[in-house]
Amino acid sequence: HVVPLRLHVSPERAPDAVLLTFRDLTQQRRVEQMRADFVANASHELRTPLASLSGFIETLQGPARNDTPARERFLAIMAAQARRMSRLIDDLLSLSRIELNAHVQPQTKVDLGAIIAHVCDTLSPLARDRGVELEQVRETADLEILGDRDELIRLFENLVENALKYGAAGKKVEVRLARENGTAVVSVRDFGPGISPEHLPRLTERFYRVDVAASRDQGGTGLGLAIVKHIVARHRGRLGVESELGNGAIFSVRMEALPNPEKNL
Ligand code: ADP
């Protein structure tokens, strides 16, 4: 917008200088709008399991009071809803903690190979449940970066867990580690249904899901990739996603690698 500007200054009271400050209110409004949307979305996400819990409590206090099999079933659903609320709150807290530290680059020397091995270990029960072979491909022996170990574990857990959840049962998931010049590249590939192009740019938005019901069924909060994006940014890295419908998806993270002491690279 071009806004006409008039200054009314009487000659006898004319100042020596005038300081004009301009602020881009459009950007500020956009940030405020995003914040308001986020609070509205988070409240809605929390209210859904809470409403279900309240409904079951009323049923248990009334009609199902003496119906033991129904009571057991309802209690199991209630426990699952409580777990969902708890996961959501954990994710919201993680997101706000990572955002708070966004400007501080983590400085601990971390071995990415060890992180990936740990993540694959942690997720091996889920892989077994889904009948998926979780394959680690190491194109380089040593791959170290400066980072935050817990956050990196979280980052790759989210990517590998998504590949296991949204990939195809019975097909493999591949986690590849490589060094490209001075860059560490970790990519997670699944061979599932893939993601259509119109969704790709929005995947890292908070609460954005391609298929809300599928995400809920898998216990998703819709915050996993938003957390991934923030951790990658804090490590001054780049997150990429390539996918085609029917051909699986590849999520890749590129971060500056420490020089390899043995090979002098
Ligand atoms: P969620 O908690 O729903 O898993 P994420 O932020 O981790 O949230 O992912 C957002 C959405 O992106 C998921 O709901 C899913 O629709 C889609 N998605 C993520 N990873 C994959 C994948 N490997 N294949 C297909 N879709 C995926």
Image (cartoon, rainbow, N blue to C red):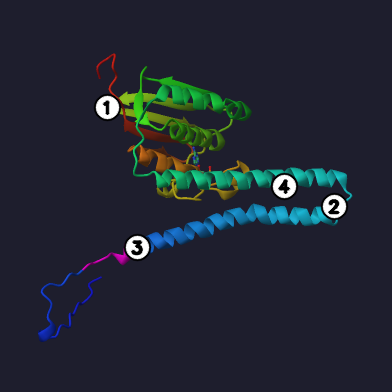
- Spatial CA span between label 3 and label 2: 52 Å
Say if mark 4 contacts mark 3, CB within 8 Å.
Answer: no
| Amino acid identity at mark 3 | Gln
Q: Is residue 215 visible?
A: no
Name which of mark 1 and mark 4 comes first in the sequence: 4
Looking at the image, residue 64 lies above or below residue 17: above
Q: Is residue 235 magenta?
A: no
In the rendered structure, which disc, 4 or 3, sits on the residue that comes first in sequence? 3
Give the mark nearer the N terminus: 2 vs 1: 2
Viewer-nearest of labels 3 and 2? Answer: 3
The C terminus lies in quadrant? top left
Which amino acid lies under the numbered mark 4 shown in the image of this protein? Answer: Met
Kindly identify the residue that appears in the image at 83 percent across and 47 percent down: 70
Q: Quadrant of residue 231?
A: top left
* Whether residue 101 is situated above or below residue 163 in the rendered picture: below
Query: Which residue position is annotated with label 3?
Result: 28
Q: Amino acid at mark 1?
A: Gly
Q: Secondary structure at mark 1?
A: loop
| Mark 2–mark 1 distance (CA, rounded to whole Å) | 64 Å
Q: Residue at x 60, y 41 (%)?
A: 218
Residue behind mark 1: 182
Gap in Å between the C-alphas at discs 3 and 1? 37 Å
Please give the label number shown on residue 84: none
The residue under label 4 is 78
**Residue at which label 2 appears:** 64
SS for dot 2: loop
Question: Image point 56% across, 36% down: which residue?
Answer: 165
**10 Å crowding of disc 3: few (<14), some (14-19), many (20+):** few
In front of the other: 173 or 68: 68
Query: Looking at the image, is 155 positioned above or below residue 18?
Result: above
Nearest to the eye among marks 3 and 1: give it: 3
